[in-house]
Amino acid sequence: MPSVRARAPASSANLGPGFDTLAVALALHVEVTVEDADALTVVTEGEGSELPADASHLAARIAAGVVGHDRLRVTVRSAIPVGRGLGSSAALAAAAAAAAGAPDPLAVAIATDGHPDNAAATVLGGLVAAATVDGAAVTRRLPLDPGLAFVVLVPERRLPTEEARGALPATVPHADAAFNLGRLALLVAGLADRRLLVRQAAEDRLHQAQRAPLFPEAAALLDGLVEAGALASCWSGAGPSLLGVCDAEGADDVRARGDELLAAAGVPGRALRLAPDLDGLVVDGTPVAVG
């Protein structure tokens, strides 16, 4: 096969009340190139480069599964931190599948990730809603105010998704479910028009408080983001990264304050200012069209 290069963005899922339903693509990317070779060769650069560069690598497994053999050279260049709640596995799966020629990279990414929110954002770009309906994923782009930007606090520590999901209860009270539905409606409205966004729109009762013991500093950092000027703040996916939804004009100030917040909390890490990624999955320079 000829050399094919695919790029996919990071994503932040849940966004507070939209548990397993809402996600936004962020302008932080992984790039995967797949081409024929005499034997499997895996080359990795950037984030995740400490992982074994062999047949166990997710990109190699995805590419070989699509092509039907492993006589491939798979090159991965990533700026997406691994295990930080930024959709690294969904992005890598989508990019590897697309570079290997999969007809439906979204389906591959969903199967790899186990749920459709991060996968939908990384393939479609922008703000997305995703759900499983009658056993099939249904994904939709939602309006996103072009004046928004995002500040992400990225701790050096990892929080495996399995551990974060293990902290969740099997059932939730009716009042908590209704609380989240109300906040979700406010959040969708505010993300479409930032003038309508209130900090309470990102409140949640289904997962953030339950995961707080895994990252005790999170609550103070989330409050600090809003005090610094973010319109709202929440966990990014299963964490431990934290997301500030900002007016783009003030996002640089929030990012600078984010570094100070991490240092004051004694949490090694970094603050990033990121634009939303509106292209989603791109193959050889062309965004992938998904019906």
Image (cartoon, rainbow, N blue to C red):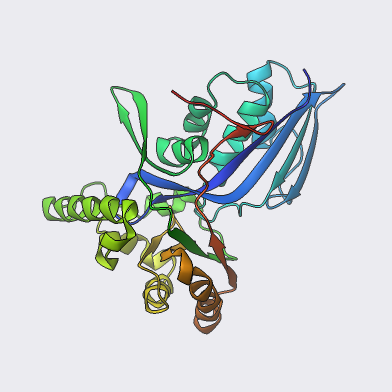
Counting from the top left corner in percent of width and height, residue 74 is at 76, 32
Q: Nearer the viewer, residue 46 or 5?
A: 5
Q: Residue at x 50, y 63 (%)?
A: 152
Which residue is the extreme one toward the top? Answer: 68
Which residue is the extreme one toward the right? Answer: 38
Indicate left or right for 255 with 76 as reference.
left
Is residue 240 among what the camera can see?
A: no
Q: Which residue is drawn at 62% across and 47% down?
A: 29
Counting from the top left corner in percent of width and height, residue 189 is at 26, 52
How many numbered marks, from 0 up? 0
Q: Is residue 208 above or below residue 222?
A: above
Q: Nearer the viewer, residue 44 or 6?
A: 6
Q: Is residue 53 above or below residue 152?
A: above
Indicate left or right for 35 with 288 as reference.
right
Q: Nearer the viewer, residue 254 or 233?
A: 254
Q: In which quarter of the image is the C terminus?
A: top left
Q: Quadrant of the N terminus?
A: top right
Which residue is the extreme one toward the bottom? Answer: 264
Locate residue 130: give its quadrant.
Answer: top left
Q: Residue at x 46, y 71 (%)?
A: 250
Counting from the top left corner in percent of width and height, residue 14 is at 36, 50
Indicate left or right for 32 with 188 as reference.
right
Q: Residue at x 45, y 44 (%)?
A: 126
Is residue 122 among what the camera can see?
A: yes
Counting from the top left corner in percent of width and height, residue 284 is at 69, 31
Indicate left or right for 20 with 186 as reference.
right
